[in-house]
Image (cartoon, rainbow, N blue to C red):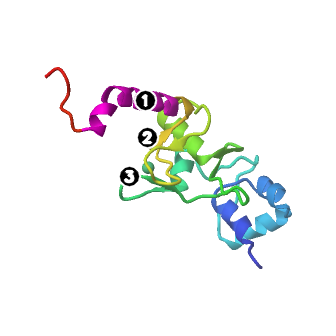
Amino acid sequence: MKVRADVAEMLRAGVPHSRIARELGVSQGTVRRTNHALGLPAPLRGGRPSRYPTLVAVFRGNSEETEDGHVRWTGYRDASSNTPLLFYAGEKTPAPKAAFQLHYGREPIGKPLPTCGMTGCIAGAHLADRPMREANARADAAYDAIFGALSTNDEPPQGT
Ligand SMILES: [Zn+2]
């Protein structure tokens, strides 16, 4: 049979068959046959994504650490927005949000964005949400207010 790349990709990401069928507009039979053609294990009954036991495992199974300590998403991406998506317990979560939650133990406020300079990095420790970015901006402003003058001229500090 002809295997559709998008179906195959979602199957490998552990997306439930019913969701693949619904999102891609194919029949569940097509999804099942693709699953079989790819040699993937049959899903457990109940429709729950069962290939991965925990959110951490799903995350690790769809990402890889680079040599310099960043993390790159290797899993499924939304076809139109290119957002990396993680499928877990019937939910679809943007991978950066999941990475943030796993690292900080709370939901991000606003979008978690990498602060390390690597585009698309999803290492938990490299992500900052809106309050963290605002705190960093305030710290930068305070730093500039205190030290900014010294960094822009060569006068020695006063009071010495
Ligand atoms: Zn990084």
Q: Residues within 10 Å of mark 1 (few under 14, many from 20)?
A: few
Left/right placement of residue 17 relative to residue 63 reads right
Distance Cα–Cα, label 2 vs label 1: 23 Å
Q: From the top left corner, tell me how far across and down residue 149 is, in percent.
A: 31, 32
For the residues bearing labels 3 and 2, Cβ distance under 8 angstroms: no
Between discs 3 and 2, the one toward the N terminus: 3
Name the amino acid type tagged 2. Answer: Ala
Q: Residues within 10 Å of mark 3 (few under 14, many from 20)?
A: few
Distance Cα–Cα, label 3 vs label 2: 10 Å
Q: Nearer the viewer, residue 160 or 37?
A: 160
In this view, the mark in front (2 or 1): 1
Between discs 2 and 1, the one toward the N terminus: 2
Q: Nearer the viewer, residue 58 or 123?
A: 123
For the residues bearing labels 3 and 1, Cβ distance under 8 angstroms: no
Q: Residue at x 80, y 54 (%)?
A: 18
Count of numbered circles on the image: 3
Question: Which secondary structure is most common in the magenta stretch?
Answer: helix
Q: Which residue is mark 2?
A: 125
Left/right placement of residue 61 relative to residue 1 reads left
Q: Nearer the viewer, residue 58 or 5?
A: 5
Q: Nearer the viewer, residue 91 or 153?
A: 153
Distance Cα–Cα, label 3 vs label 1: 29 Å
Confirm or reject: label 3 Cβ below 8 Å from ligand 1: yes
Q: From the top left corner, tell me how far across and down residue 138 is, in percent.
A: 46, 27
Is residue 54 visible in the rendered image? The answer is no
- Which residue is outermost to the top? 159
Q: Quadrant of residue 96?
A: top right
Q: Which residue is mark 1?
A: 141
First to last magenta residue range? 132-153
Q: Which residue is mark 3?
A: 69
Left/right placement of residue 115 relative to residue 143 reads right
